[in-house]
Image: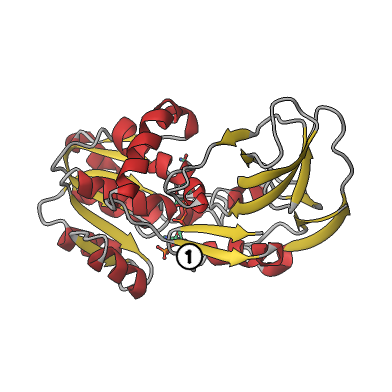
Amino acid sequence: MRSRQVHLVKRPEGPPALEDFEVVETDLTGPAQGEVLVKNLYMSVDPAMRPRMARGYELGKPLVGGALGRVLESRHGDFKEGQIVLNRMGFREYFVSDGRGMRKLEPDPALSLTAYMSVLGNPGLTAYGGLMEVAKLQRGEKLFVSTAAGAVGQVAVQIGKLLDCYVVGSTGSEEKARWLRDELKLDAVINYKDGPINKALRAAAPDGLDVYFDNVGGDHLDAALNVLNHGGRVAVCGMISGYNEAGSRTVVRNLSNIIYGGITIRGFAGPEYMHLQGEFAKKMAGWLKEGRIKYRETILDGIDAAPEAMVGLMHGRNTGKMLVAL
Ligand SMILES: NC(=O)c1ccc[n+]([C@@H]2O[C@H](COP(=O)([O-])OP(=O)(O)OC[C@H]3O[C@@H](n4cnc5c(N)ncnc54)[C@H](OP(=O)(O)O)[C@@H]3O)[C@@H](O)[C@H]2O)c1
């Protein structure tokens, strides 16, 4: 059968451009004994893919990323036809696999399938793990989350509100700022494109901050270091402001505040919070059903839209999780 996949054909210089990608048609054979044929339904588009385009992804080969698919044909004892599977074979319509790296999913019919790629999936767990395990956020504390209207950010700010925290969020458009303010009920919202984040953050957090959940790095981290109270914690989830360059170009000037402010800065990734998967999935499903967590997704249609989704993500054209539906 024929399947299409997205190749990286040029290493981006600065932000990724449409010409850096090509959608290529290939032949697929199988499945052989011990293999399954999967049709991807949704693919995840992630900021972390951008640094991998500089080093990691091979040119002329399909990109690699998270996806959710359905087993079309199985010659594998562990998988039945129709089974929904989470996999790392995104950026292709169909694939044949021996099952390694695939996780069976029993979706709750009361919840949307796409939620397993966003609030209930890795972005949600990242927000939960970063706040609970890394930052050890306490009820009533003062929290700042950057890229607050993004996939991870939208969950982090709402967990903060569920814990009665004073929550400040930053984002890059008026429309997203309005959503954060009016619907997610943040205490203060900063559009970082309106002016220097340093001044805006000080005004938004007059009593300082206890926790900064960092998705941006650079000037946002610098501003937070200036406003954090004594004993403040920074959970470094991502540093998207530097992903289009080889490292962040913004000089962090306020590092010395770590000393007398007794500030802890801790980076984290999957292994730090994977043990929370079970408790998180249960809590989040409950919050969603009770309407206590809201979420948005930006879903582009068809594999031809995948390059546009990647480019758009790095320009803030998504609210909530950026996905491609196949
Ligand atoms: N540690 C982990 O395990 C882990 C897991 C998942 C994600 N992450 C990290 O978490 C962060 C958010 O990821 P996500 O998947 O939730 O993506 P996302 O926030 O849904 O999308 C990325 C957003 O970043 C913002 N952005 C782009 N360039 C920026 C810049 N130069 N300065 C400030 N903001 C910029 C844009 O929103 P605006 O409109 O706000 O500009 C864009 O919508 C990323 O840094 C990512 O690498 C880490």
Residue 31 in the figure: left or right of residue 165: right
**Amino acid found under the numbered disc labelled 1:** Asn
Task: State the residue in front, 306 or 142.
Answer: 306
Please indicate, yes or no, whether residue 315 appears anywhere in the rendered image. yes
Q: Quadrant of the C terminus?
A: bottom right
Q: Position of residue 55 (x, y in %)?
A: 67, 45
| Residue located 31% across and 51% down the image | 293
Which of the 4 image quadrants contains residue 78?
Answer: top right
Report which residue position mark 1 lands on.
318
Q: Secondary structure at mark 1?
A: loop
Q: Position of residue 221 (x, y in %)?
A: 33, 50
Task: Please tell me whether residue 26 is drawn above or below residue 308 in the rendered image.
Answer: above
Residue 141 in the figure: left or right of residue 293: left
Count residues near mark 1 (Cα–Cα under 10 Å), then give few for <14, some for 14-19, many for 20+. many
Which of the 4 image quadrants contains residue 10?
Answer: bottom right
Task: Please tell me whether residue 95 is drawn above or below residue 172 in the rendered image.
Answer: above
Task: Please tell me whether residue 261 is drawn above or below residue 183 in the rendered image.
Answer: above
| Residue located 55% across and 52% down the image | 46
Looking at the image, what colour scheme do you see?
Answer: secondary structure
State yes or no: Cβ of the residue under disc 1 lies below 8 Å from any atom of ligand 1.
yes
Q: Position of residue 19 (x, y in %)?
A: 73, 68
Please indicate, yes or no, whether residue 14 appears anywhere in the rendered image. no
Residue 277 in the figure: left or right of residue 83: left
How many numbered discs sit on the rendered protein? Answer: 1
Image quadrant, ligand 1: bottom left
Which of the 4 image quadrants contains residue 190?
Answer: bottom left
Task: State the residue in front, 107 or 151.
Answer: 107
